[in-house]
Every structure is written in structure tokens, then in C-alpha cells.
Amino acid sequence: MTSLNNTVAERSAQDTKARGFEVPLEVFVLSYAICWIPFMIFSKLASSKPHGVMTRPLSGLELLPMTTVLTALGMFLFFAASGWWRSAHQVTVKNLPLPVPNKWTGLAGIGAALIVLTVPLSFTFRDVSIPFIQLLTKGGVLLIAPLVDWVSGRKVSWYSWVALVLVVTGLLVSIHQRGNLKLPPLCIATIVLYILGYFIRLRMMTRISKSTDPEARKRYFVEEQIVSNPIALLLLFALAAIGGNGPLLSIRWGFINIWSQGVLWLLIPLGVLPVIVGILGARVLLDKRENTFCVPLERSASVLAALVAAYLLARFSGLPMPTSGELIGAALLIGALIVLSLGSRFSAKA
């Protein structure tokens, strides 16, 4: 009996020691928020002020091809250098192992492709501030979650309804203070596609990869990304090939002409930072804990980063300060996230 107790004690000590080397989730959340700030700042600067030989700011669609190319390149270079690609499912082609997705990570990749395209675009609309677009996108993701559960016949907990009321109130306050919800059609499409992308992605994450196993997390992320980045690029290539006038011509210009405009130094961070943000965000969302804990952490980090970015842009670049309505809306949204996180924890203990 004594021998058995000693063995159990030794294993417990080993487990504790192993856990001691695990980076706390809060560190990933803080790093995630910090990396968001320069990404938002560079996106807004590129689309609000002339740079290089340009006599006008770049539009979001003109920026999108270059940022997508750089992000895809950076992500694949990271997988190759880190060896993460070995965690994915493999097929061998002429003695060369290649990572491949399964059907679930393939579906998640489609959702992630929508996010890859809409996130950089969301910060480039004129007269739409960073805090306001964050309220619409992040709040929208929270807004549909309990409604989808309710329509599907699933029980929606009390704290989800409380959070829903807070989100709706925050959005109404922000919209009222702004005076209207008149947004460019492309901005509305961006918000809708962003919410749809996150809905698909979170469904697949929950189904296959919320695990304590680091290899399972890597497998999911690699397989999702090797689908999402090529899909995003192919879609942009197809739209650029169609060409014509207006938005599609802007995408074509972004593929061909932007490289010679002297703004490359400003756009390189827009390709590098999404790689880091994507890795950190996936680490938070793929944590073994429930979505109602992980999603609020990830959402609140980006909302707080948006406020910091807006203040820095106002202080150093002369852009408008966040309005009182945006601050109230952000506070209510973060309150909703806290309610979701604490409510799920207390309910689990009960």
C-alpha cells in the first residue's frame, strides 16, 4: 500500500512539474491584444493618409491583395520553420509528405478564409472608426450565439440572455450617439461575412479540437490555415481577373500596381502581424475550456486593443478620438463578455 501511495505521489509531482512549464492562458491573451494594436494602427493609417508617391489614401480593396499574399507567405514560412506542418494529417506524393486537411478542418478553413479577407478590410472604411467596427463585428458574433442555440432547440442559459441584452444595449447606444447606421455596402458585407466565418470556425473548433493535447491544437490550426489562405487568394485572383470598374478594378490594382507605390514598408506589418495574431488567437480559442470562457477572453482582448489603437491614432495622427457612445458600447460589450465567462464558470460548479 505504501509503495502504491509513493508511486501515485511521484506521478502527481511529475504532473505538477510538467504543468509548471505551461504558459498561462492569460499570457497568450495579453500578447494577442498587444499584437492587435499595431495591426489596427497600420491598417487605419494606410487607408486614411497618402503615403509614398500616392496622392491619396489607399482603399481597403487595394490593400487586401498585398496583405493576403504576405499573410499566406508568412504563415507557410512559419509552418515550415517551426515544423508544425508535421502535426497535420499527411499524404505522400512521390515520397514527399504533404499536410492535408480532413473534412472538418476543411470546413473550418472556409470559415477562416472569410475572416482572413474581412479582418484587414474592416479597419479601412472611412468615417467608420475602429471601436465602432469592433463593436459591430465582435458584438455580432456574441449576438447570434444564443439566438442560434434557441432556434436549434437548445437551452440558452440565463447568463447568455443577460449578455445578449448588454450587447444589444451597447450597440444601440453607439448607433444612437453616431446618429445613424448608414454604412458603405462593402462595410455591411464585411460584417456579415466576418460573423458567418466565425460561426463556421467556432462550430468546427468545438467539434474536433478543444483538447489538452498540444499536437491536436497544432493539427487543427495547420489544417485550417492550409485551406483558408489558398481559398482567400484564389477568390481575390478570380475577382481581379474579372476586373471591370469599381471594386473589382481596385482588387486588380492591388495585385499589380501597389508594389511600386512606395508604401511597402507600411504594408509589411499588415502581412506579418496577422500570422502572429492568428497563432495566438487560435491558442486561446482552442483551449480545453468551454467556448463561453475562451471566446469572451479573445473578444474582449481585441475590443480593448481597438480602444488603445484609436487613442494612439488620435494622439499622434490627428484622427478622431473615440466618442462617448463608443466607449459606453465597448464597456457594455466587455461587461457582456465578463457575464458569459463568470456565468459559465458558476453554472459548471453548480
Image (cartoon, helix red, strand yellow):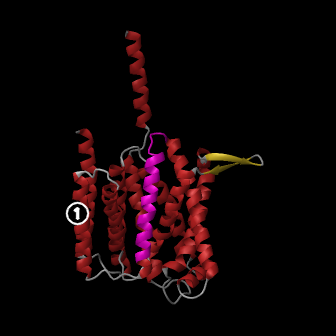
Determine the residue located farthest toward the right in the rendered image. Answer: 94
Q: Position of residue 303 (x, y in %)?
A: 33, 64
Circle 1 SS class: helix
Question: Which quadrant holds residue 125?
Answer: bottom left
Q: Which residues are magenta?
A: 188-213
Q: Against 160, is 252 above or below?
A: below
Q: Residue at x 55, y 71 (%)?
A: 67
Q: Position of residue 203 (x, y in %)?
A: 43, 53
Q: Residue at x 54, y 67 (%)?
A: 271
Horizontal side, residue 63 vs residue 315: left or right: right
Q: Position of residue 162 (x, y in %)?
A: 21, 58
Horizontal side, residue 23 vs residue 102: left or right: left
- Tell me if residue 83 can be seen: yes
- Tell me if residue 310 can be seen: no
Q: Residues within 10 Å of mark 1 (few under 14, many from 20)?
A: many
Q: Residue at x 26, y 64 (%)?
A: 167
Which residue carries the number 1 mark? 166
Q: Residue at x 44, y 27 (%)?
A: 14
Q: Main secondary structure of the magenta part?
A: helix
Q: Quadrant of the N terminus?
A: top left
Amino acid at dot 1? Leu
Q: Position of residue 204 (x, y in %)?
A: 47, 52
